[in-house]
Image (spheres, rainbow, N blue to C red):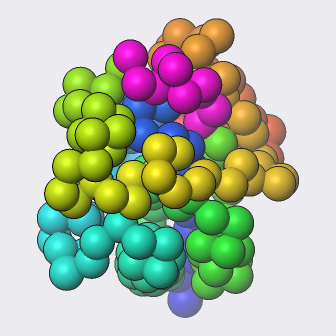
């Protein structure tokens, strides 16, 4: 019987650095021959959740779909990294209950910094109430900070490398990643 792998679940505002840190972590682990799957929320929105909008209920449904995919992958012994906003405590609790072996990474960054980093212009579109951005997180809908994340990465104060190294150390210490991969 195959041993179930962990899921590393990234949460945070749009532009906080979730995808950047997750991609860097994946690259490091793959270079050390660790089987790892990366699920990026933006890409999943264009595929498995293309039928959903951005209302609170639709966001929670998207998170359920992501959690269920992570479960299938982790049951096959592959470490899964999910880079998704998951703006509500309810959606993160669903993921934690579904996955059992979930490590929650809160990529924390002030809204003003996230807005400056927003190369896609999502915050601007939301403020201008452009179609499709009516329920954009932190502009017209809320983001609930996680109550008990396993680690907080302060990306307005840490470089990408500092955040990744801090995360790797914590993953190793927590037993999520075996020493041979670090």
Q: Position of residue 85 (x, y in %)?
A: 48, 53
Residue sitting at 36 percent across and 20 percent down? Answer: 117
Residue sitting at 35 percent across and 67 percent down? Answer: 54
Q: Position of residue 140 (x, y in %)?
A: 47, 52
Q: Main secondary structure of the magenta part?
A: helix
Closer to the camera, 75 or 15?
15
Give the magenta range. 107-116
Residue sitting at 63 percent across and 32 percent down? Answer: 108
The single residue placed furthest to the front in the displayed view is 128
Q: Tell me where residue 52 sits by quadrant.
A: bottom left
Q: Position of residue 141 (x, y in %)?
A: 52, 56
Magenta stretch holds residue 104: no
Residue 36, visible in the rendered structure: no
Closer to the camera, 110 or 22?
110
Residue sitting at 46 percent across and 26 percent down? Answer: 114
Q: Note whether 38 is above or below 61 in the view shown.
A: above
């Amino acid at each position: 019987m195959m041993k179930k792998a962990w899921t590393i679940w990234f949460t945070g505002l749009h532009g906080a650095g979730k995808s950047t840190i997750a991609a860097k972590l994946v690259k490091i682990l793959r270079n050390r021959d660790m089987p790892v799957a990366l699920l990026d929320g933006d890409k999943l929105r264009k595929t498995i959740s293309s039928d959903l909008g951005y209302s609170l209920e639709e966001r929670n449904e998207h998170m359920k779909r992501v959690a269920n995919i992570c479960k299938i992958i982790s049951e096959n012994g592959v470490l899964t990294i999910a880079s998704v906003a998951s703006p509500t405590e309810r959606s993160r609790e669903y993921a934690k209950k579904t996955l059992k072996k979930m490590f929650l990474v809160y990529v924390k960054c002030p809204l003003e910094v996230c807005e400056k980093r927003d190369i896609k212009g999502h915050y601007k579109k939301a403020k201008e109430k452009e179609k499709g951005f009516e329920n954009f997180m932190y502009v017209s809908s809320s983001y609930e900070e996680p109550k008990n994340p396993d680690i907080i990465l302060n990306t307005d104060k840490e470089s990408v490398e500092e955040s990744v190294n801090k995360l790797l150390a914590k993953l190793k210490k927590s037993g999520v990643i075996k020493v041979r991969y670090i």
